[in-house]
Amino acid sequence: MANRRLPIAVSIGEPAGIGPEIVSETYRRLGTEIDFFVIGDPRHIDGPTEVINHPREVAGAMPRGLPVLLRDFGSPRVPGEPQPGHATHVIAAIERGVQLVMAGKAAALTTAPIHKKALKDGAGFAFPGHTEFLAHLAGVETVVMMLACPELRVVPATIHIALKDVPTALTRDSLTQTIRITHAALRAQGLNNPRIAIAGLNPHAGEGGAMGTEELDWIAPLIKDLRAEGLALKGPLPADTMFHARAREGYDVAIAMYHDQALIPIKTIDFAGGVNVTLGLPFVRTSPDHGTAFDIAGTGRADPTSFIAALRMARDMAPDMTDGAPA
């Protein structure tokens, strides 16, 4: 009999947010379309669950309920109100997901949203965000966050830092790494020579030095050097004209210089369906492109569209691995 494809691991994220709700609703909507399991506390999930002891049990459990690899968080969730005692368990669930994927027990990792302040307050979480923590767990020095929807892929060259710190953090070496990681990842996804558009740092890409000189000093020369290696690059381009429909037809991915320069266009184009993909990890990781949404947690208004898209993208990107057990 044919072997089963490995399931996708899902870390539950912050229980007080909408993570448990969108995960449960995803199961209700998808049924058995995608084999996945949640690492978390089944008491936090509204709907039928099946506690499993190993990812290989997922396929058999899916018809009966959402498979949950048990992590006892110690207390129930209170929507909208993070519990300090949950923080260590949120972190441990992420760690467990990474362990399973890197051990070849799960095909990919999809993460529900965390709340960084709650983790810092409750467990001294020392990382700026999910992406940096995953890089640490994987032993990778540099990763890239890509936001994707059917109409746009965009990569911020700097992520969770204050705007005033961007010009210092953005260097020739860091931008080169971002471009190379993005190029390699898209090639791995089947684009032979991905077209990469690179935004300027300053308004109007500096307008010939009148609004800043970084473009003239080093960004344009860097692009020229990499283009000479054969990379299909264009830029630096004014960010305010890069993201309309006709402009998007000219590239496969855009690289922006800072967080909001990247996230505003994708959230405007597809607020509910955007997916966060971490490039440069030794495994596939996706997540919904939204946060914990404490203000609507427990109200029944949480939209699972982005989480469903993240799960499907993880399935499509993951290597076709099986667990060796008969179907």
Image (cartoon, helix red, strand yellow):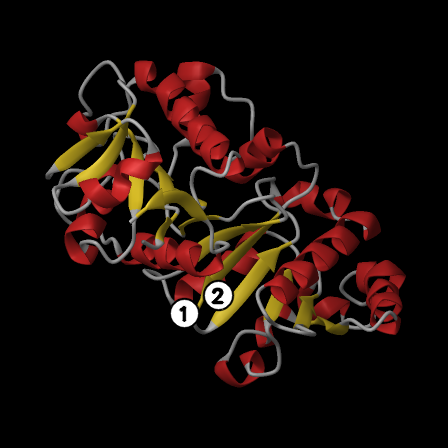
How far from the left and from the top, in percent, is residue 252? 59, 73
Along the line of sight, the residue nearer the viewer: 50 or 21: 50
Q: Which residue ends up furthest to the bottom in the rendered image?
A: 246
Q: Splitting the image into 4 quarters, where does residue 232 fall?
A: bottom right
For label 1, the residue is 269
Task: State the CA–CA distance, disc 2 to disc 1.
Answer: 6 Å
Seen at 72% across and 59% down, the residue is: 179
> Residue visible at 49% across and 39% down?
104
Q: In the drawing, does residue 144 fall left or right of residue 115?
A: right
Give percent across and percent down for residue 210.
80, 67
Q: Is residue 161 above or below residue 173?
A: above
Disc sitting over residue 218 in the figure: none
Q: How many marks?
A: 2
Q: Position of residue 101 (x, y in %)?
A: 48, 38
Image position of 217 (left or right of 271): right
Counting other residues with Cα less than 10 Å from the Cα at mark 1, is it few (<14), some (14-19), or many (20 or more)? Answer: some
Q: Which amino acid lies under the numbered mark 2 shown in the image of this protein?
A: Pro
Q: Does residue 45 show up?
A: no
Residue drawn at the location 61% of the way across and 67% of the way down:
254
Place of residue 99 in the rendered image (x, y in percent of width and height, measured from the top left): 49, 30
Asked whether the viewer can see residue 174, the reply is yes
Circles 2 and 1, Cβ within 8 Å, touching? The answer is: yes
The quadrant in which residue 40 appears is top left
Under circle 2, the secondary element is: helix
Kindly identify which residue carries mark 2: 265
Q: Is residue 249 above or below residue 277?
A: below
Q: Residues within 10 Å of mark 2 (few under 14, many from 20)?
A: some
Identity, as a three-letter code, of the amino acid under mark 1:
Ile
Task: Decide which of 136, 300 is in the foreground and name it.
Answer: 136
Question: Element under label 1?
Answer: helix
The residue lying at 62 percent from left, 62 percent from top is 188
